[in-house]
Amino acid sequence: MNSLSRGLLALNLVVLGMLLGRLGWPLPGSSPLEAQEPASRLDASRRELAQPDSPLLRSSELISRIVRLTTASVVHIETERRTIRGRRADETGSGVIIPSPRSGEFVVVTNSHVVDGSDVNDIAVHLFDKRVLRPVRKLEDRSTDLAVLILAERDLVAARLGDSDRLQIGHLVLAMGSPFGLSQSTTLGIISAKGRRALKISETSDMLNQDFLQTDAAINPGNSGGPLIDMQGAVIGINSAIASNSGGNEGIGFSIPSNLVRTVVDQLLMNGRVSRAYLGVSLDPDFNTEAATALKLDRVQGARVLKVNDNTPASRANLQVDDVVLTFDGVEVQDESHLINLVSLTPVGRKVKVVVFRNGKHISIDVTVDDRSQLDRSQGPAPAEPGTPLDQLGMTIHDLTSDVVAQLGFEPQTRGVLVLNVAPQHPLAQQLRPYDVLAEVAGRPVTSVAEVQQVLQSASDSQELVLGLLRRERGQVRQVALVHRKG
C-alpha cells in the first residue's frame, strides 16, 4: 500500500470517527473517565497525537496537499451587466482554469449565470497571485449553465478534469470558490447522490441538460462556477446551485459532473456552440405505477411516449405512442428527464439502438438522431417576409405582429421587433437568440423596423448601445439588457 492509499484510509477512519463522535457512540480505547485521567496520561495522549505518523495529522496533511495542488487554478470572477433601463448590476462567482484540449490556450470554466449578459470588457478574473485578467472571448451554453472564458495569458496554473463516472456515493470531495466574495475558500463533504435531474433551479432557468452530483460540502452564493475536487486533486464537478430555504448553505448543493463539462467545453471551443440531438417525441412527465401496469410493465421504468411528431427521427424509426423507452444506446433509461439528457448529448447524425417495451414485448429499433436546432427553427413563427438584416447588431429583425406575439407566448400588449436570425460570428451571437423581442435601443422604445433604423442612425456617434430585449424562458418572460460596443 503506497503513502497516498494509506493517507486515504486514514482519512476515512477519521471521518468515521467524527460521525461516531457526533452520534455519541464510544470510540475504541475511550471511556467517560478519560477527562479525569492523571495529567501524565493526558500529556502522553497529546504527545501521541503530535507524532508525524498520527492518522489525524496524515489525513489533515492529505487534504492540505490537495488544496495546495488546486488553489492556484481557482479564480474569483466579478462581472458587470446592464439592466434593460441601462443601470449596472454586479455579479460575483468562481471559476477554474483548465487547459484547452485543442490549443495551447488556457480557459476558465464557470457557470453561464455568473457571466450572462456581460461583455468581456466587464468581466474581471481574479487569480490566486492577485493578478486581474480580462478574457478575450466568452462562450456560453445556457442549457447546461456552463460558460468558457478564453484567456490570452500563458503563465497560468491549470487544474485537470477527472472522471465523474467513477464517483460513488460517499466519496469525499472538496468545494472551492469564493462564497460571499471570500476568495480561496474550501469546504469538505461527500457525494450525497448522483443523477439529480428535473430540478427547478430558478424561475428563469433555461437548463435542458441536468445530471447533477449532490454534495453536502458547503456551497454558498459566490461558489457558483467553482470546482468540486476529488481526493486525487482532480476537478470532478462545477458547483452550480443549492437547495435552500434561507439562501445559504443547508447541506444540499449541486455540481455539474466533469464528464458533461468536458463534452460541452470541447464543443464550445470547436464550434462556438453545442449541437444537440433530438428524437421528436413528447414524453410522459407523470408516468406512474397505474400507467405502467396498464402497459403490462411490472414496475415504473423508462420513459413513456405520449406523442410522435411527423417527419422526425422517431417517426422515421416507427416509434409509437405508448412505447416505453427502456434503453438508449445501451444505457438504461431512468425516467423522461434522463432520456432527454441522453438524446440531446448524442452526436448529431449518429445511429443508436433503442429498446422499447410495446404490447408486452421488448423491441429493438435503430434511430438516427437529428440536430435539435432544425426542430427549433421549424417550430418558430414564420413571417411572410425574410426580415431586415442589421449588420451593426448582428441580427435580422421583422415587425412584430399580434399573431406572432400570440405564437411566442408573450402578453398581447408586448411591443418591439422580432429577432429572426443571429449572425454566428457577431460579438453578440452568444447573448442573442432567435425569437427574442427587441423592445429598446439606446434607451428608446422601438415598435417597428423603421424605428430601429432611425435610432441606430441618430446614435451613430455613440461608442456603445444598450439593447433591451424580452425573452420567454420556461413559461416566464425575462428582461435582458445587452451592451454593443463599436470596434
Image (cartoon, rainbow, N blue to C red):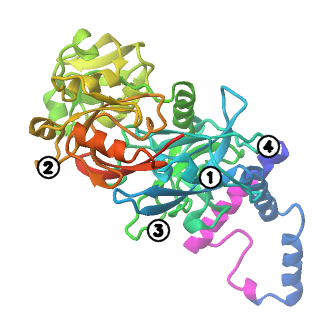
Q: Mark 3 against mark 1, which lies toward the viewer? A: 3
Residue closer to the observer: 25 or 21: 21
Q: Which mark is residue 173?
A: 1
Using the rendered image of the protein, determine whether residue 297 is visible from the camera's viewpoint. Answer: no
Q: Position of residue 431 (x, y in %)?
A: 42, 41
Q: Nearer the viewer, residue 200 or 28?
A: 200
Above or below residue 161? Residue 27 is below
| Image quarter of the N terminus | top right
| Dot 2: element | loop
Between discs 2 and 4, the one toward the N terminus: 4
**Which residue matches tag 3?**
248
Give the residue pinned by disc 2: 411
Q: CA distance from mark 2 to mark 3?
A: 34 Å
Residue range in magenta is: 10-35
Label 4 is placed on what type of residue? Answer: Asp
**Gap between marks 1 and 2 measured at Cα:** 46 Å
State the CA–CA distance, disc 3 to disc 1: 19 Å
> Residue 322 sits in which quadrant?
top left
Residue that numbered label 4 is attached to:
155
Question: Taking 479 as reference, is 385 left or right?
Answer: left
